[in-house]
Image (cartoon, rainbow, N blue to C red):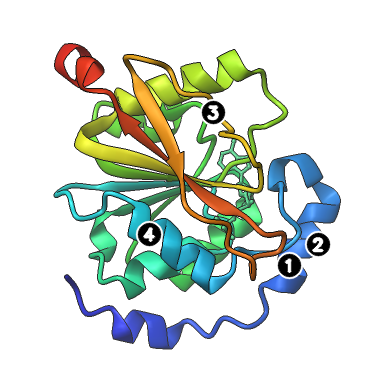
C-alpha cells in the first residue's frame, strides 16, 4: 500500500456540490446524479472492489474524483489508476487535482478507442459509475461482457447505482451479481453492485 497522504492533503475538496449540480442541470442523463457520492459510499465501493489484485485499475465516470480519492485513501498507488471521464471540465479538474493518476477524457463505453495503444491491457478491477439504466438490458449485458474480457483473473466490476434490482442482469456462464447494503447518507441512497466472473467464462475467455 502507498502513503498518499501528501496528495490527499493537497486536495482541498469542499466545492464539489456546486459544479456537480451545475453539470447535472446541463446534462442530467449523462450525469445521473445531482451530487457526488458520499464518503461512506465511496469507501464501500473501494472495499468491494478487487483492488488487492496486482495490476492497473480502471475507473469509469470518476466525476470530480470522489471514488478516486477513496482509492488513494485506501493506499492504492496512484500510478495504477486510470480514470476515464467524458466531461471535459471534469476531466481537466481531475487532472489538476490528482496529476499522479492517469486521467483520460473520453468515452467509457468505447474503451478500444479511448484507451488507444493501451486497448489490450487487462485490469485488476473496474469501478463503474456511468449512468446506463436508460439503455436496453441486452446492451448493458454486452457492455459488461466486454469489460469482463478486460479483467484479470479474480478481478471484479463494482457499480454505483440507486436501483433496487441489479442494473445489469447477470449473464449465466459469464458473470454473476450481488450488492452491498444501501448506503443511506448518499444523495440519493445507493448501493454498490458487485459483478464477479463465472468460472466457465474465465477458463474460456480470460
Ligand atoms: C453519477 S456521476 C459519478 C461521479 C463520481 N464517480 C461519484 O461517484 O461522485 C457519473 C459520471 O459519469 C460521467 N460520464 C457520463 N457518461 C460517460 C461516458 N460515456 N464515459 C465516461 N464518463 C461518463 C459523467 O460526466 C459523470 O461525471
Q: How many marks on residues?
A: 4
Label 1: few (<14), some or many (≥20) within 10 Å? Answer: some
The residues tagged by marks 1 and 4 sit, at their Cα atoms, a distance apart of: 24 Å
- Disc 1 designates what residue? 19
- Disc 3 designates what residue? 168
- Disc 4 designates what residue? 46
Label 1 or label 3, whichever comes before in sequence order: 1
The image shows residue 125, relative to residue 188, as above or below, that is: above
SS class, disc 3: loop
The residues tagged by marks 2 and 4 sit, at their Cα atoms, a distance apart of: 27 Å
Instruction: Check if mark 1's residue and mark 2's residue have beta carbons within 8 Å.
Output: yes
Q: Nearer the viewer, residue 54 or 83?
A: 54
SS class, disc 1: helix
- Disc 2 designates what residue? 22
Q: Is residue 95 visible?
A: no
Instruction: Check if mark 2's residue and mark 4's residue have beta carbons within 8 Å.
Output: no
Query: Residue shown at 25%/59% (left/top)?
Result: 79
Classify residue 149 as left or right of residue 26: left
The residues tagged by marks 1 and 3 sit, at their Cα atoms, a distance apart of: 29 Å
The image shows residue 42, relative to residue 108, as above or below, that is: below
Q: Does mark 3 have its CB less than 8 Å from ligand 1?
A: no
Q: Quadrant of residue 101?
A: bottom left
- The percent position of residue 198, horizontal first and vertical second, equals 27, 23
The quarter of the rendered structure image containing the C terminus is top left
Classify residue 54 as left or right of residue 32: left
Instruction: Check if mark 3's residue and mark 2's residue have beta carbons within 8 Å.
Output: no
Q: Does mark 2 have its CB less than 8 Å from ligand 1?
A: no
- The percent position of residue 190, horizontal first and vertical second, equals 62, 55
Amino acid at each position: 500500500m502507498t502513503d498518499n497522504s501528501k496528495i490527499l492533503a493537497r486536495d482541498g475538496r469542499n466545492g464539489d456540490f456546486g459544479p456537480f449540480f451545475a453539470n447535472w442541470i446541463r446534462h442530467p442523463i449523462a450525469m445521473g446524479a445531482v451530487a457526488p457520492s458520499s464518503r461512506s459510499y465511496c469507501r464501500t465501493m473501494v472495499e468491494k472492489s478487487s483492488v488487492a489484485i496486482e495490476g492497473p485499475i480502471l475507473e469509469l465516470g470518476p466525476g470530480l474524483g470522489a471514488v478516486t480519492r477513496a482509492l488513494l485513501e485506501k493506499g492504492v498507488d496512484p500510478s495504477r489508476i486510470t480514470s476515464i471521464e467524458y466531461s471535459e471540465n471534469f476531466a481537466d479538474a481531475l487532472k489538476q487535482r490528482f496529476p499522479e493518476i492517469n486521467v483520460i477524457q473520453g468515452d467509457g463505453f468505447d474503451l478500444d478507442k479511448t484507451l488507444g495503444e493501451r486497448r489490450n491491457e487487462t485490469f485488476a478491477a473496474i469501478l463503474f459509475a456511468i449512468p446506463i439504466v436508460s439503455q436496453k438490458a441486452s446492451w448493458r449485458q454486452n457492455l459488461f461482457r466486454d469489460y469482463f474480457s478486460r479483467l484479470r483473473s479474480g478481478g471484479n466490476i463494482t457499480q454505483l447505482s440507486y436501483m433496487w434490482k441489479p442494473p445489469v442482469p447477470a449473464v449465466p456462464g459469464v458473470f454473476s451479481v450481488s450488492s452491498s447494503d444501501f448506503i443511506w447518507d448518499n444523495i440519493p441512497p445507493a448501493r454498490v453492485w458487485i459483478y464477479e466472473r463465472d468460472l466457465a467464462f474465465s477458463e474460456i475467455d480470460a
